[in-house]
Amino acid sequence: MRHFLTLNDFSKEELENILDIAFDLKKEIGNGISSQKMKDKSLAMIFEKSSTRTRVSFEVGMTQLGGHALFLSSRDTQLGRGEPIKDTARVISRMVDMVMIRTFKQSDIEEFASYSRVPVINGLTDEFHPVQLMADYMTMIECGKIDNPKVAYIGDGNNMAHSWLMLASKMGFELSIATPKGYEVDEDILGTALENAKISGAKINILNDPKQAAKDADVVTTDTWASMGQEDEKKQRELDFKGFQVDTDMMRLAKSDAIFLHCLPAYRGQEVSEEVLESSQSVVFEEAENRLHAQKGIIVWLDTHRG
Ligand code: CP
Ligand code: NVA
């Protein structure tokens, strides 16, 4: 049995295989066919943080596959009142066929998975957002950006930056991450990515100059300056991230046919300008839709690898 906790747990071939399934399912549903691959199966979705895309895409995805999804907010379950993760995992995984969790610590989702009888999917932690990157890569493929693309991530060294590190280092493309000083990516995660890069041929550039990162990029991406759980730091971060907004001038440094990606929600006037977000280079809503298709691919792949 396999879990989907970080992209690092998967080989390049496995990630490509998941995306092949996702593209097939996208085509099927576009033709009005619902393959019922999860017929009568249930997905528990545990949310300890807010969500629009993740909740809707997983829930609708399960419906389209003939199954059912349960929304479990930690505020309304015994988990929120202190029931241990290991007990919750053993109870829920005896009743459902798969679990998706959005929480704070990566170690909590790993603990849950270690006690679970069924596959567990990471729907975002403070460290990683792997399902988002599957949708992002799917969008890059659709936009023809997979022939040695240069990706520029400009902003906070957060869960999205870490997940880009994992994707680039597995797939073997060039990634430049530019963060303000003091907001760099985690050193251990960077170390893992650099090890992967030795095998895949990926080129990883860690910078503090956003313009250097954006130069000649095929894909420019960013994320909120204050992630969920960092609301108190918002004001300070706005000061510290000055000069890191992806605006029209920044996009001009990239290739003329570069695309703009953002996991959303986006904060206009902060990490991205209104103009860039609404420009013809922005494919953020195609990217958001691909959450649905990519995750259906993940669900079906995990279900067929249960042994
Ligand atoms: N990108 C993303 O995960 O969005 P939500 O927080 O709305 O799920
Ligand atoms: N980095 C953001 C991503 C939201 C989808 C957060 O963790 O809040």
Image (spheres, grey):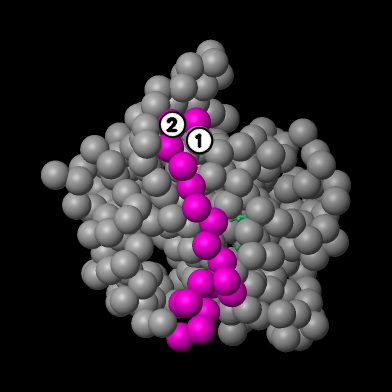
- On screen, residue 144 versus residue 84, left or right, reads right
Residue of label 2: 66
Judged from the image, the quadrant occupied by ligand 2 is bottom right
Q: Residue at x 59, y 74 (%)?
A: 75
Residue at 71% across, 56% down: 265
Residue hosting label 1: 63
**Residue 197 image offset from top left, x and y in percent:** 31, 57
On the question of residue 108 being in view, the answer is: yes
User: Is 160 drawn above or below residue 261 in the view shown?
Assistant: below
On screen, residue 59 versus residue 112, left or right, reads: right
Residue 290 picture quarter: top right
Marks 2 & 1, CB-CB < 8 Å contact: yes
Residues in magenta? 64-82
SS of the residue under disc 2: loop
Gap in angstroms between the C-alphas marked 2 and 1:
5 Å
As for residue 75 lying within the magenta part, the answer is yes
The x, y position of residue 64, in whole percent, is 50, 31
Counting from the top left corner in percent of width and height, residue 69 is at 48, 47
Classify mark 2: residues with Cα within 10 Å, few (<14), some (14-19) or many (20+).
some
Q: Is residue 110 found left or right of 60 in the rendered image?
A: left
Determine which quarter of the picture holds residue 9.
Answer: bottom left
Residue closest to the far top: 31
Figure quadrant of the C terminus: top left
**Label 1: element kind:** helix
Percent from the top left, x then y, of residue 8?
31, 58
Please tell me whether residue 134 is drawn above or below residue 271 in the rendered image.
above
